[in-house]
Amino acid sequence: MSEKKATRAAFGETLVELLYEGVDVYAVDADLSGSTTTAKLAAVAPERHLNVGIAEQNMIDVAAGLSLAGKTVFTGSFAVFGTGRVYDQIRNTVCYTKLNVKITPTHAGISVGSDGGSHQMIEDIALMRALPNMRVLVPADFNSTKAALRIAAATPGPFYVRMGRANVPSLYPDTGGFELGRARILREGCDVTIVACGVEVYLALEAAELLAAEGIQAEVIDAFSLKPLDAATILASARKTGFVVTAEEHSVIGGLGEATAALLAENPGVAVKPLRRIGVQDRFGTSGEFEELFREYGLDAQAIHDVVVE
Amino acid sequence: MRDSCNFEAVQAKVAALRTDIVRMITAAGSGHPGGSLSAVEIMATLYFGGVLNYDAENPKAEARDRFILSKGHAAPVLYATLANAGYFPREELTTLRAFGSRLQGHPDSLKLPGVEVSTGSLGQGLSISSGLAYALAFPASAQSPTVFTLLGDGELQEGQVWEAAMFAAHYRLSNLVAIIDNNELQIDGAVSEVMDVRDISAKLSSFGWYVLEADGHDVRALYKELTTAKAHKEGPAVVVAHTVKGKGVSFMENQCGWHGKAPNAEQCAAALDELCAPGEAALSVSDRPADREVV
Ligand SMILES: [Mg+2]
């Protein structure tokens, strides 16, 4: 865990790589090309980058139109606008017609920071998971974000890839080993399973260090693919530890915690102890710095540690 | 695009489409006759007047022009057109809205050949058509297929339409043609009273569109303006077609109550009497439940 980089930084860079690899790739953004980093594609192939201005509904459906001509299309904007404001366009056009559009906004979660609650999207996973034909990937670092975008590009049909603004530690040395529907075990342990996604993965690893100092061995799983969820990996770990804690920078409603809860409820007896869910507890975000917010919302390593030992 | 048009043949299709629409909505027991009947001449001119380049035998041919029904609730006029154009058997029309049918309440492109994209949630077709037109025009070519899209006048109340109108003009999408079925009614009443869209032509002109107008029930006028719009290469073009909601069935004309209501057997027979040659109206519409209102 050395070099810190924002997951969004992988976005534009991967688009350019895909283009040079021969993918017929397009990006449609809504006046946030610098922030999302899609501007990197515009710099090398301006005709493949469409800026619709501040018009997110048009962004999604222009992307839909491009995909009808066989293009592989990525959308931009911030997660709050790029999923919430355009839910109907994603539902009724992209997913209902099963189009090859990748919903890939950045700035998800409360780690957006000082912009405050209006810009801190905490229910995007719930919205996107609920859609038929939609696949949902929540990468944890720069390399896994590259892998997620590549999986989305290589797999026909709608995808949601969640990216953030905050700089987060590097967890993976390269982009290899990621698959749709597959979680990755980053640390093995026998006392508790912490299933995390996105920025919470490195915080879960930090919590595991705190727990280890107290003699508690935590197994940390990077869920990565929230839909489809890697049921086999999560259940096997739960069977081993008997205790599952989920951690996500998202509302506890409709995200990884509820997906895991459903999985455990449908497989009774696998986990001995009741599931505990780390996440935003049905409230909006607020302005602040990363550390302040993660402490306030009970999302930091200490909070994960405390839930485990409780 | 043909150099000339057999207007008698188009007019014959106009009659066939109207009777098909009335029959299929009656059979379904629900659906949208008003806005389907108002668009009949528009659809007949596009598909049977030689304006739209298509091949029903090869619905995915790359060089085809595209038609996108932005006002997806007018599915019956699209289905009747596609059936008469040979995309699927005409007998299938009376399965409209039935369980297991390819003819969904609103167009589903995953089910029915000839439907380019699923629609039904208003305000999205112009954006989709714009993205498609952009992709088809790149790399630039004189042979770029044209994308036609049909919108309702009430649909123009959706803000997204104006996002797309800006976009299409900004990117100078010269292979994009919008058609407005300007029947001046919507579900709750007159467009001017529910939420006045005012001067559609002036608005689109100020957005940078090449604006044409036509009597939407005159196939000669429609042919002239649609071919002019298709040939326009300086940016997007729109044909504002002035129409009558429920056109062709006297008791449905200009009645917003017939936006989303199916005729019962008696009303169907009366409608077909007006639309068909004597005797033809006796064709059965099946015994599926009728007179259910869609709200
Ligand atoms: Mg209308």
Image (cartoon, helix red, strand yellow):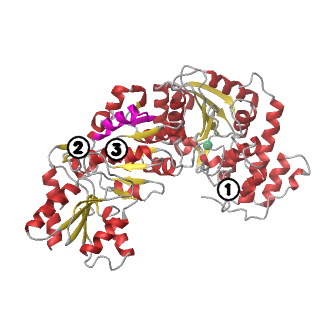
Amino acid type, label 1: Lys
Indicate yes or no whether the magenta region holds residue B123. no
Q: Are marks 2 and 1 in contact (CB under 8 Å)?
A: no
Residue A231's place in the image compared with A4, above or below, is below
- Determine if marks 3 and 1 fall on one subunit: no
Asked which secondary structure carries label 2, the reply is: strand
Asked which secondary structure carries label 3, the reply is: loop
Residue stretch in magenta: A10-32
Between the residue at mark 2 and the residue at mark 3, the CA separation in whole angstroms equals 13 Å
B263 relative to A299 in the view: left or right: right
Q: Name the quarter where the C terminus of chain A is drawn.
A: bottom left
Residue density around tag 2, few if under 14, some if 14–19, many if 20 or more, within 10 Å: many
Residue A57's place in the image compared with A20, above or below, is below
Q: Are marks 2 and 3 in contact (CB under 8 Å)?
A: no
Q: Residue A152 appears at what percent x and percent y?
A: 40, 46
Q: Nearer the viewer, residue B84 or A285?
A: B84
Residue A105's disc is 3
Asked which secondary structure carries label 1, the reply is: loop
The quadrant of the picture showing ligand 1 is top right
Q: Nearer the viewer, residue A242 or A9?
A: A242
Residue that numbered label 1 is attached to: B261
On what subunit does the disc labeled 2 rest?
A
Residue that protrudes farthest toward the left in the picture = A213
Residue that numbered label 2 is attached to: A6
Residue density around tag 3, few if under 14, some if 14–19, many if 20 or more, within 10 Å: many
Amino acid type, label 3: Pro
- Determine if marks 2 and 3 fall on one subunit: yes
Q: Residue A213 appears at what percent x and percent y?
A: 8, 66
Between the residue at mark 2 and the residue at mark 1, the CA separation in whole angstroms equals 54 Å
| Disc 2 CB within 8 Å of nearest ligand 1 atom | no
Residue at position x 21%, y 70% from top? Answer: A192
